Each structure stands twice: as C-alpha cells, then as structure tokens.
Amino acid sequence: MNTSLDLVITDGQIVTSNGIFPGTLVVRDGRIAGILAPDAHPDSTRHISAKGLHVLPGLIDSHVHLRSPGNVEREDPVTGTSAAAAGGITTLIEMPISQTPANTAEGVKRRGEAIEAETLIDFALYGAAGHENIDKIAEIAEAGVVAFKTFLTPAPLHREGEFFGLWCLDYTLLRDVMAETAKTGLRHCFHCENYPMIETMIKRLSDAGRNDGLAHAESRPSIVEDTSVAIMLSLAEEAGGPVEVVHLSSPRAAQIVKEAKARGVDVTAETCPQYLFMTDEVLAVHRGFAKCNPALRPKEEVEGLWPYLFDGTLDLMGSDHSPFLPEEKEGEDIFAIPPGLPGLESIVPMMLTAVNRNQLTLPDLVRLMVVRTAEIFNLPGKGEIAIGHDADLTFVDMDARWTFDRHACFTKAREVMRFVHGMPMHGKVMRTMVRGETIYDDGQIVGQPGHGRWLKPA
C-alpha cells in the first residue's frame, strides 16, 4: 500500500467551528490524513503555501437550483458548479425542480447521473414530496435523496411538469404527505408562504394599478410567511418527522421556529444572504432583477433577523441560486416576472464582508455553511477539517478588498446579477479544493467536469 502523502498545505490559519489556529494539513487519497504543528513540513508529492490565507472546511450550499437536466440556456452543471467553485462552494444540495424532476425514484436516478457526469464539485439531491406523488415517497428516499422539498404555493403557470409532486395547498393532504415523509426519517423542507393571502393581495394591488417592484414586497409581507410557518409546524408536531423552513426571511417566523424548538419539535431553519444584507428598497431600483420569494423585507425586519443567527434558531445558510435569462427578468408587470436570484458566487463574499464588519466570525460562518449543513443532511465525509474527512477546503484572503463584477462570473445568469454588481467586498475566495484537487484558483477554473460525485446519506 502506498503511504506517501499526496499534498501538504502549510502556513495557513485553519478555521473550524470552534476557533482559528495555525497548522499544517496533510492529505492522502483525497482525505485529511493529519493536522500538524505549523512548523511541520513533511515530504509530499505536492505542496501548497496558504501564507496570508485562512483555510476553511469546504463550504456547502444547502439550496441550489441548477435545474439540470433541461433549461440549459439558464444554467448547466458545468457552469453552475464552476460558479459554485469560484464562490468557495465545494458541495451543493440541488433542489428537485427540473424538466426531469426528482418526483420518482427514476427521476432521482436520471437527475443524479446527469449532474454527476458534468459536475466539478460534489452534490446531493432533494426529492419532491407532494399530494400527487405520495405513493412514490418511500422509493424516492431509497433512491438516495438527502431530504424532501415541498412548496406550499402552486406550480407556476406553464411549469406544471417541473413541479409535479412538489407542492400542496390542501392542509389535509399535506398532513398525509408529512406522515409519509416522517416514515423515511429524512428531513422535510418547506417553502412557507400562505398562498390564499398572496392571491388576494396581488389582486388588490393589480386592481389599484400597482405593478412596480415594491408591489411585489407588498403582495408578500412577512405575515404571509409567518402564518404558513405556524401551520406547517403544527402539522409537523403531529407527524413527528424532522422538518425545515427554507429561506426564512421574517423575524416573526424565526420566533415561531424558536418556540417550536423549545417545545421539542425537530425543526431546522435556513436563511439566505439576500435576507440579511438587502432590503425591499432594492426592488424599487432593480425591479424584476431583485425579485425573489419570499420577498425582500423592510430594513427593520432585516435587522431583526440577525439575532436568530446566534441563538440557534437559524441553523444554516444557502444561496437559493435561481438562474434566469435577463429577458425573463425584464418587463413592466412585476407579477409576471419569475422569482429567483443567482447567488452561488456572491453568498460567500457577502458573508466574508460581514465577518470583516464584525457582524459574525469565521467560526460562525463555518457553523452556518459547513458543520450544521453536513449534520442536518447526513453528508458523508463532509462537515469539518478532521482526520478521515474529505479534503474539501476553501482558502480565503480576509484582507482583500475588491468590487463585485458580474461580468467576471461563471454562471450563465451573470447578467441577472445587477443587485450585487458593483458591491464593495472585503474578503475573497482564492482557492477551492474538492477531495484534495484544486477546482478554482485565483480567478480560474482549473478542475475538470466529472470530478464531483453524487453524495447519498451516510
């Protein structure tokens, strides 16, 4: 057996959820083989100096829409995972919306194989759970998904095929669906918005001649999310299975989650950087290019969400990367524009900037984007810089000051990224490594499609 080291990484500051310390990392066969004193320099095939850099465990994006296979004009696995690597992401978890949706075991298999053939980084899959495919939930779990996803809003017009088995409005049917997902033991994740309230609010605004950017936020105020979260958690308490609120944006919804946790409900919550750094005023400037669901919130609600990052209510961070063509995000009627923002390349720079502003620490970032995500979704080999774990590493320069330029991005949706274009950043991803292989290095993609692998629950 060959016991030589593949790689030694010296001179860096190693970051874990517990702290930061200088050290030398040694890698063998794509895994961490040792964490040594900073003055250790063992022989190896390759050597990387991380002088001046912090070395984080590979960051995980819990909420991504590559939409593969299909809709390749918006994104494909190569461009999407290149964007992820450039953004410091080493593993992503792909949502089930696609022209080949993950609403059957066969759909899961086809999606996983299609992405694995082209991906540069590792990935896992959500499965779809709705009243239309309730009889398929057990087989979807067996096919290797790490969680289920359900929208509590209907399928968008003309996209019904992509959303088959992915939504439920009837709470009696939803009760049945949640009972089935609970049997699998996998976490059931929910897009929580109260659609009957939204319908009425959109009609009132449209009748009043309102179709501007801010009308979108007014049609989906926090109460829409709060009431939906409360109902879902009430059903979850009965069903008994683990659940999650995805892209939580409302402080009141966070408080509802906090109280449910205190009662013993197995609930986790995810938020996204747009709900921590952007207010509804961005909709007035960028209109459809800033439209997402849930909608952006007023300044006082954005500020009110931050404390829940630190008290255990908000468990993890995801980008909710949702690529579209620029012409799809244009138009006079905000209600006719599809919701979604590309975010794979901006989530980490935004969070590093927040670290430099003393809004959180690097160990906080590791907890929110690595440790808890790997725990919640049971991702094998992921979650820490630790002996035996995959050598997934994100190298960052915390001193770098730069301006975000959408034209330098790898996503096909770069022209949609107007909301973040020109934003000053403090902290930059310099290198991204997946299982000991460098995928991104200082502005260049150097990895090869097909290097990434499909992760199934440990």
Image (cartoon, rainbow, N blue to C red):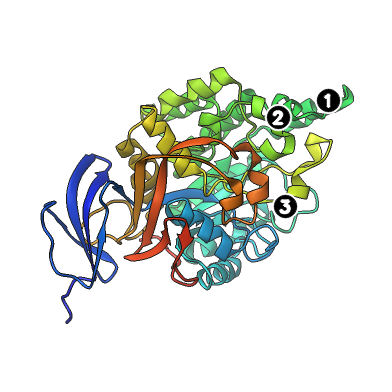
Q: Quadrant of residue 355?
A: top left
| Residue at image mark 2 | 285
**How many numbered callouts?**
3
The reply, left or right, for residue 371 in relation to residue 65 is left
Asked if labels 3 and 1 touch by Cβ distance under 8 angstroms, the answer is no
Identify the secondary structure beneath mark 3: loop
Q: Residue at (78%, 49%) from the top-left corner? A: 327
Label 3, label 2: how far apart the Cα atoms are: 19 Å
| Residue at image mark 1 | 210
Q: Is residue 59 above or below residue 161?
A: above
Identify the secondary structure beneath mark 1: loop
Specify the amino acid type for callout 2. Val
| Residue at image mark 3 | 325
Q: Residue at (54%, 67%) from the top-left corner? A: 115
Q: Is residue 106 above or below residue 368?
A: below
Question: Which one is earlier in the sequence, the residue at label 3 or at label 2?
Answer: 2
Asked if labels 2 and 3 touch by Cβ distance under 8 angstroms, the answer is no
Q: Is residue 288 above or below residue 185?
A: above
The reply, left or right, for residue 1 in relation to residue 121 is left
Specify the amino acid type for callout 3. Leu
Q: Nearer the viewer, mark 3 or mark 2?
A: 2
